[in-house]
Amino acid sequence: MNKLTGKIIKGVGGLYQVFVDGAGEIPCSAKGILRYHHVRPLIGDEVTLDLPEGAKKGSMLSVIPRKNELVRPAVANVDQAMVVFAAKDPEPHWNLLDRFLIQMKKEHVPVVICINKVDMVSEEEKQSIRNIYAGSGCTLVFAQAKTGEGMEDVRALLKEKTTVLAGPSGVGKSTILNRLYPQALMETGAISEKIKRGKHTTRHSQLFPVDTDTYLCDTPGFSSLFVPTMQPEELGSYYEEFRPYDGQCRFLSCRHRKEPDCAVKKAVTEGKISSTRYENYLLLYEEILKQKRY
């Protein structure tokens, strides 16, 4: 038995592509023992496989215990997520971005925010974006994938990590992937001039080995996200900017909405917390309240 260890980079119809250092991609089927124990292999799983001498197809023997697992997209062993938004065309939807950040924070996955198409905005507009997410706890990077501007900074942030690449359609995710890993030959979707939305170009999740121990998981674009199920009072804990003001409000149970002498509202007024982030917090709080009612 020629026993190897690799990482699942693609899975369609029960056939998996496993990337093994020094051997490249090996097609594999899952052994019956995995189905017997109800183990469903995921993109990103570290697995052991048997590849008989001279064979072109291997058999997956076991899935090495995962350090984490995301449901949407279904991928395992993620180190971080990189969410891509366009600076313009389409216009950035900050409420949608906040929803994604909350989802990732709930899964304890660090986030890199990549703002693409920066050639379409001024330095003042770039600074405005920095100000919105300065206190979010996320890493912010600007790029223009078509020309390569900022892509070395992006590459450095991805090095030796498994990263989920996500974002709305039409923001340039496929262009970024092509720039980082030309072998992917991803179709790049044009923006519809009529509705200013991107065409979906990724139909399934797939992991690309962009460098040594560096993997990028491309995922289908999204246009809406539900807020994860939680109690309304939990929402504030997902806004890193609020943390410095814990215990400074008049009421210990302050929800930072209509209560008097609220330290968070005061910080917003003083420009210490982004008003955009705070307004998104209020909108999401109301959404969670409605969920609880129904």
Image (cartoon, rainbow, N blue to C red):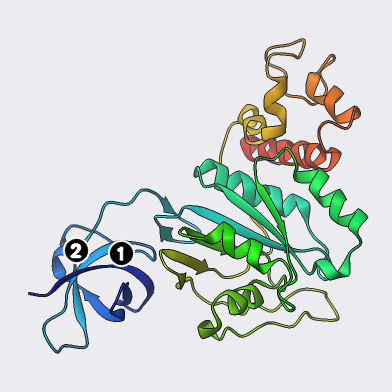
Q: Is residue 99 left or right of residue 79?
A: right
Q: Quadrant of the C terminus?
A: top right
Residue 34 quadrant = bottom left
Q: Which residue is mark 2?
A: 34
Type of the residue with mark 2 = Leu
Q: Name which residue lies at 54% across and 78% down.
A: 181
Choose top left, top right, bottom left or bottom right for residue 290: top right
Element at label 1: loop
Q: Which mark is residue 41?
A: 1
Which residue extends farthest left? 1
Q: Position of residue 136 (x, y in %)?
A: 69, 40
Mark 1 or mark 2, earlier in chain: 2
Q: Horizontal and vertical percent for residue 97? A: 70, 53
User: Which residue is pictured at 80% across the width and 48% down the height?
Assistant: 130
**Label 2: element kind:** helix
Q: Residue furthest top?
A: 250
